[in-house]
Amino acid sequence: MNINDFQTLLINRNEIEKILGKTITKSNSEDDYLEDYRMFAELSLHDVTCLLLGLHPGNWNAHQHPRYDVIYEAIQQAAEKEYIPARIETDINGNTTGVSLTHETAAKWAKTHGLKWNVPPYRQIINDNAVDSTQATTILQQSEEIKRLQAENAELKAQLNKNTQQQQNSINYDKCSIHGHTSENLQFAFKLAKLIAEKCDPDNPHSYPTKEDFEEYVKKYYSDSSKLAVAFYQILTPEKVKTRGKTPIGVDTFQGFI
């Protein structure tokens, strides 16, 4: 990271969320119910069929979907013939009464047949001790990362202040010099810059002198060289002023260097 990154390096909610790897606030979504199904190690064939079709399993009319019966029967047949892993429940006569699939099997079926499976994977039960240990480690890592960023912030701020001070020291306004160097033209440029700063409004490009104003003032008080006057104009005039266009009615304009 370099000094230019300082202005964007802030310890705020965005940084904390980045470190945590998750958002602090979460908006509700109509697809939130899919999160509930990750709690099931196995899903019933009805639930799987609905989820493959993008339907809520609790919808009483889900079976009326034109593809529902086809997908349901195809999966049941594959399970009964052991083409796919599944848990099958039967009655005393050996008739199938229920079929359950794992998330992995349902996801593979969807991929094979061009269907969508947007259900998050099943989350394994974690031992409490393991949770506590993991959370403690994560918190420690997060704390260390925040301290590192804060230290880097302080270092970059100090470097920025140092660079700013060095830049200020490199310009001597009293002697009209830069890095200890000066000349007649540089001294006159400092004078023009001071006059422009005093008489012009940065928010009003029409308050700045024109090229003709520069030529007139330079010729009268410094040099007959038109090229030198134009050079002062090019160096001291902001680019937005050079393309300001026609002055609107009622807008303040440049009233002269004197």
Image (cartoon, rainbow, N blue to C red):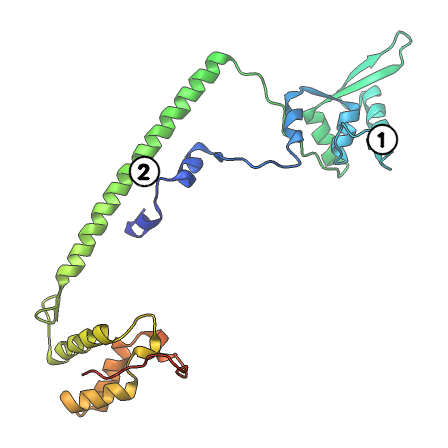
> Distance between the Cα atoms at labels 1 and 2?
55 Å
Residue 178: percent from left, percent from top: 14, 68
Query: As shown in the figure, which amino acid type bears the numbered disc 1?
Result: His
Q: Name the residue at 15% across, 77% down.
A: 191
> On the image, which quarter does residue 224 sit in?
bottom left
Which quadrant is the C terminus positioned in?
A: bottom left
Residue at x 66% of width, y 30% of height: 34
Mark number for residue 149? 2
Q: Secondary structure at mark 1?
A: helix
- Left or right, 9 with respect to 40, comes to left
Evaluate whether residue 35 shows in this view: yes
Badge 1 or badge 2: first in the primary sequence? 1
- What residue does disc 1 label? 63
Q: Nearer the viewer, residue 32 or 197?
A: 197
Query: Residue furthest toward the bottom?
Result: 224
Report x, y in % for residue 8. 35, 48
Front residue (pair 55, 68): 55
Residue 125's label in the rendered image is none
